[in-house]
Amino acid sequence: MQSEKFDINEVKRRMHGASQALQHELGGLRTGRASASMLEPVQVDAYGTHMPLNQVATVSVPEPRLLSVQVWDKSMVKAVEKAIVDSNLGLSPATEGQVLRLRIPELNQDRRKELVKVAHKYAEAARVAVRHVRRDGLDIIKKLEKAHEISEDDQKRLDHEVQKATDATISEIDQLLANKEKEILTV
């Protein structure tokens, strides 16, 4: 039987991955300000297949409350418009030739609170993912110690390193959440 190897860098990488995933998810949450990342989840029916919006158009933010979508192919304008309307983002495009303009409406207080709750759910999911990585790392360390491949002192040291990485990542997640919450609640 081949013994498992423990690599603290792998644990840190996986924890950082959870943090990055959270950052990506939070980027998709709509705040009162326009952000090109808001349209990342939009899929367009183009050329007989579903394509991300950024593969058929350029998204820019000319004003804080306005998104501009420059469609590259004139024949795709209607498909892009339909995809944006169907995306449940609550945005309605105004078409001017090959350019779609999307006004970002003000968020009311109830919607802001709802978005904060969603952000908290995303953050909790990221924390859970980090804890799973920690558990996996600690399990490997425990197995190595039981198999007498590492000493008890090494086990304690590695346990401490894993916990330190966990604490740092959880702290990073909390900071991301706090920043997003502040952004959402800013009127």
Image (cartoon, rainbow, N blue to C red):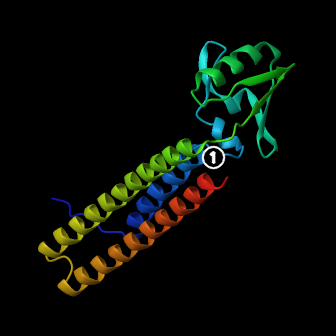
Q: Which of these two is toward me, 7 or 79?
A: 79
Among the 4 quarters of the image, the one containing residue 69: top right
Q: Which residue is at the far right?
A: 97
Percent of width and height locating residue 118: 46, 46
Percent of width and height locating residue 26: 55, 49
Percent of width and height locating residue 73: 80, 19
Residue positioned 71% across, 41% down in the render: 36
Question: Does 91 appear above or below 81?
Answer: below
Task: Find numbered disc 1 in the image and state the secondary structure of the residue it sits on.
Answer: loop
| Left or right of residue 156: residue 63 | right
Residue positioned 58% across, 43% down in the render: 28
Among the 4 quarters of the image, the one containing residue 4: bottom left
Residue positioned 29% across, 66% down in the render: 137
Question: Does 108 appear above or below 82?
Answer: below
Percent of width and height locating residue 76: 75, 16
Q: Which of these two is toward me, 145 or 164?
A: 164
Question: Badge 1 is on which residue?
Answer: 31
Q: Which of these two is toward me, 101 or 41?
A: 101
